């Protein structure tokens, strides 16, 4: 016997095994909070390290080209394991995978904090990445399952668990600048140990157990195509964002070309084999497809601009790393607060009427900020513009992800969350690379750094505005009402004999097929 939602991992093991009392019900909010804590550590770690590369270069007396591998090794390892997340969750159980990923990340953090050379630090960062790559997609799946098992509230839970995505990048430069300047670079990594240890303990206690499925076969050929393809593609884009010739450099276009080729071969294969590593046919269903189309240009524009913002404060206004972080902290705070309101509205209001205004608010704030860069703005003007930007971001990111995954069928939740994470990772990398290349070109061709930043921000604004088009195609009906396209057929990956529809009614619609 299992919970009516049909979501893997919400069944009662004691009942299935034929004995014992029922297990204690888990609070969905508690599950979301634990997922937020773990993800926050991952995002914070990435942003802290990015502001400390020059300090690490001095510490180890190593060239910056070598120290950049502290970031590159982490990104490569992270990207290589994300595609395996759906299979791992099915084969070993989401809770086991999540706890093991946290353990790998905390071990890598502890070792990185004791690194004795640049090479050892790079190796330990790769270990961190192997764990960190699984934490976000698995955590998202666990939150979606908790929402389904509780009969709804997906928007609220996703807004809680998604705090790290928006708040972490804003707090990272502040904390990183303080640790590097006043404490020690080692604490950039050691600070993760107690926090992740708490997250592991809570996950073992709170997360529901889900039995592994030995019937889940690994698509080895698909893994050998997508994991290295995605990893080298992200690496090439990261190299472009670090400068040194941009996209024209062989160290950039060669891995990008190899990565694109491997991913395209994977796509062709995934559409023909019966059990692919990730079911790409899920993208033929409207909510997930429109959500992805909205997120890709938005994430490219927003996170690309977030790479530019601290650089502007440091290069143009002469701020330190800590001061530039303090100038942008209100963006993360505004986004986090707004997201809690927008997430709860997403459970009652049609996603179109939340996400589309959010995109337009971001575009308006970004346009205002871009205009300000052309003059001599006061600090308060820039702070207000960034605060308004944060309000729009809070209205956009999590409500879009919620709309994209709300109608995911139970077996498709891991694949849907992984697809969204792959799309977001790739969009961040592309957006950062494009903005870095444009900025480098503008710094050479335009008079004054302020003008170069202003022109580069314009293209970030264009990308954000592009997201308004698919955002206008999101469902205009509230979550309790049938979406357009409800009559569409079930995902190809799972036959539907009518039982999923019955489960979805009992689970508040979250466990229904993607339509």
Image (spheres, helix red, strand yellow):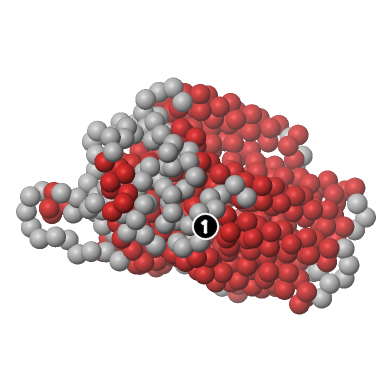
Residue at image point 59% right, 47% down = 473
Query: Which residue is the site of mark 1?
Result: 350
- Residue 308, horizontal then vertical, whole percent: 73, 57
Q: Is residue 262 above or below residue 93?
A: above
Q: Residue furthest left?
A: 19
Looking at the image, residue 482 lies above or below residue 152: above
Residue sitting at 22 percent across and 53 percent down?
3
- State whether residue 174 appears in this view: no
Q: Quadrant of residue 263?
A: top right
Q: Residue at x 6, y 53 (%)?
A: 19
Quarter of the image holding residue 394? bottom right
Q: Residues within 10 Å of mark 1 (few under 14, many from 20)?
A: many
Residue 287 in sight from this viewpoint? yes
How many labels were placed on the picture? 1
Q: Secondary structure at mark 1?
A: loop
Q: Is residue 444 above or below residue 236?
A: below
Q: Is residue 59 left or right of residue 382?
A: left
Q: Nearer the viewer, residue 137 or 505?
A: 505
Give the quarter of the image for residue 515.
Answer: top left
Which residue lies at the image location 54% right of the left edge and 53% below the top edge? 476
Image coordinates for residue 461, horizontal then vertical, percent: 74, 54
- In this view, the residue in front, 75 or 454, is 454
At which x and y percent is residue 480? 42, 57
Residue closer to the observer: 401 or 60: 401
């Amino acid at each position: 016997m299992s919970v009516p939602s049909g979501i893997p991992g919400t069944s009662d093991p004691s009942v299935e095994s034929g004995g014992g009392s029922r297990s204690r019900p888990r609070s969905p909010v508690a599950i979301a909070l634990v997922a937020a804590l773990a993800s926050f550590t991952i995002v914070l770690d990435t942003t802290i390290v990015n502001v400390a590369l020059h300090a690490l270069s001095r510490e180890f007396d190593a060239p910056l080209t070598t120290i950049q591998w502290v970031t590159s090794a982490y990104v490569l390892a992270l990207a290589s394991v994300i595609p395996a997340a759906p299979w791992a969750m099915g084969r070993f159980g989401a809770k086991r995978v999540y706890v093991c990923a946290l353990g790998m990340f905390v071990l890598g953090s502890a070792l990185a904090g004791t690194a004795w050379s640049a090479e050892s630090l790079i190796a330990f960062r790769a270990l961190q990445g192997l764990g960190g790559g699984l934490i976000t997609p698995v955590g998202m799946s666990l939150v979606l399952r908790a929402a389904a098992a509780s009969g709804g509230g997906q928007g609220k839970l996703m807004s809680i668990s998604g705090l790290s995505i928006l708040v972490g990048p804003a707090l990272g430069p502040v904390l990183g600048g303080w640790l590097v300047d006043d404490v020690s670079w080692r604490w950039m990594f050691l600070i993760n140990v107690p926090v992740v240890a708490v997250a592991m303990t809570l996950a073992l206690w709170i997360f529901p157990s889900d039995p592994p499925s030995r019937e889940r076969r690994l698509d080895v050929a698909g893994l050998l195509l997508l994991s290295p393809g995605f990893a080298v593609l992200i690496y090439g884009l990261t190299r472009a964002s670090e400068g040194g010739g941009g996209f024209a450099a062989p160290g950039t276009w060669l891995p990008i070309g190899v990565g694109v080729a491997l991913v395209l071969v994977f796509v062709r294969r995934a559409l023909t084999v019966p059990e692919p590593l990730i079911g790409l046919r899920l993208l033929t269903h409207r909510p997930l497809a429109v959500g992805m189309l909205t997120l890709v240009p938005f994430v490219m524009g927003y996170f690309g601009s977030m790479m530019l913002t601290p650089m502007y404060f440091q290069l143009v206004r002469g701020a330190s790393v800590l001061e530039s972080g303090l100038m942008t902290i209100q963006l993360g705070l505004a986004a986090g607060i707004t997201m809690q309101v927008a997430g709860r509205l997403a459970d009652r209001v049609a996603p179109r009427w939340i996400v589309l205004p959010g995109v337009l608010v971001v575009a308006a704030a970004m346009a205002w900020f871009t205009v300000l860069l052309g003059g001599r703005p006061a600090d308060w003007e820039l702070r207000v513009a960034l605060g308004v930007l944060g309000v729009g971001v809070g209205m956009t990111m999590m409500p879009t992800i919620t709309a994209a995954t709300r109608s995911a069928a139970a077996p498709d939740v891991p694949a849907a969350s992984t697809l969204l994470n792959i799309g977001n990772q790739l969009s961040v990398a592309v957006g950062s690379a494009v903005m870095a290349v444009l900025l480098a070109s503008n710094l050479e061709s335009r008079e004054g750094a302020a003008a170069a930043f202003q022109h580069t921000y314009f293209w970030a604004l264009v990308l954000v505005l592009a997201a308004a088009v698919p955002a206008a195609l999101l469902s205009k009906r509230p979550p309790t009402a049938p979406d357009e396209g409800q009559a569409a057929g079930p995902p190809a990956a799972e036959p539907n004999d009518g039982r999923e529809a019955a489960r979805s009614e009992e689970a508040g619609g979250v466990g229904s097929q993607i339509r």
